[in-house]
Image (cartoon, rainbow, N blue to C red):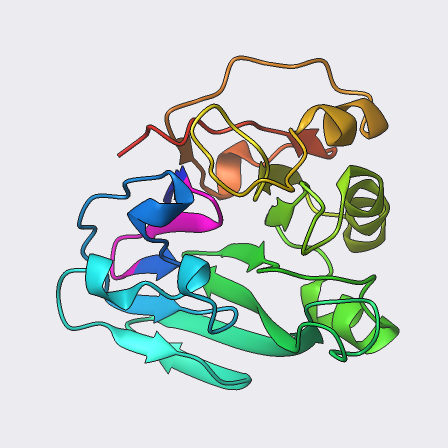
Amino acid sequence: MDIVWLGHSCFRIRGREATVVMDPCPPTTGYNIGKPTGDIVTISHSHEAHSFLKAVAGKPTVLINAGEYEIHGAFITAISTYHDGQKGAERGKNLAFVVEMEGIKLCHLGDLGHAPSAEQVEDMLGSDVLLIPVGGGTTIDGAQAAEIVSLLDAKIVVPMHYKTDVSKEKDLDPADRFLKEMQVKAAEPQQKLSINKSNIPGETQVIMLDYRGK
């Protein structure tokens, strides 16, 4: 499985049987994600910065509702959460997606705005890869993200939705606070993450991805 960060909260997950594009974003975010081809597109919520479907090539199956799905050999669970800490009163609902394919379990938290409940943790627990927002503003900040990492016990943690040199969302923090909370020194970002069952680390590891990866 190859994982590429296309910017903001958008990732392309490429497996042998399916390619998943998660939270496609428009150029107004500061990122140009190109025209990735996807078999499946997951949308955490309807804000354009997370639902720019016209950027995705092909004829993908689009997932916008909570539930369980089996598509192209991928098992996907969309978990209903909230975009804020007041049960959606401020910003509405958010979907977190758990994708299982090729023996790998990946969790994308979308614009999660709160600590997940015990039931939600059970669905997300033990993910091999966790894609987590860390920039604050309209979602959890670095300190909250670090607490959620400890709850979910993921093996590889990839930060997203934070301030970069091209991002145009003004109220985002850089990833530094999250890295400090995780006691991780800033590392050179990778162009992509290639993962299989044999190279999953034994302990939690934070990996920075470069949004310029294609």
In the rendered image, which quarter is residue 195 located in?
A: top left
Identify which residue, 130 or 35, lies in the foreground: 35
Q: Magenta stretch: residue 69 in it?
A: no
Estimate the x, y position of residue 183 in percent, counting from the top left: 82, 21
Query: Where is residue 13 shown, x and y percent of the image?
Result: 36, 51
Q: Establish if 161 lies above or below 213.
A: below
**Residue 10 forms part of the magenta stretch:** yes
The answer to whether 147 is drawn above or below residue 19 in the figure is above
- Asked whether, in this view, residue 192 is left or right of residue 83, the answer is left
Q: Which residue is depicted at the point 76% across and 44% down? A: 141
Looking at this view, is 206 or 176 the one in front? 176
Residue furthest front in the image: 170
User: Which residue does the image show at 61% across and 60% down from the upper left?
Assistant: 111
Which residue does the image show at 42% across and 29% down from the upper left? Answer: 166
Locate residue 62 relative to residue 162 in the image: left or right. Answer: left
Tell how many labels. 0
Tell me: 23 left or right of 37: right
Which stretch is magenta? 7-19
Q: Residue furthest left?
A: 58
Q: Residue at x 49, y 20 (%)?
A: 189
Residue 28 position in % (x across, y down): 35, 48
Expressed as whole percent of the image width and height from the top left, the position of residue 99 reads 49, 64
Above or below residue 208? Residue 45 is below
Inspect this view and state whether residue 71 appears: no
Quadrant of the image containing the C terminus: top left
Does the rendering let one see residue 159? yes
Q: Specify the quadrant that holds the N terminus.
A: top left
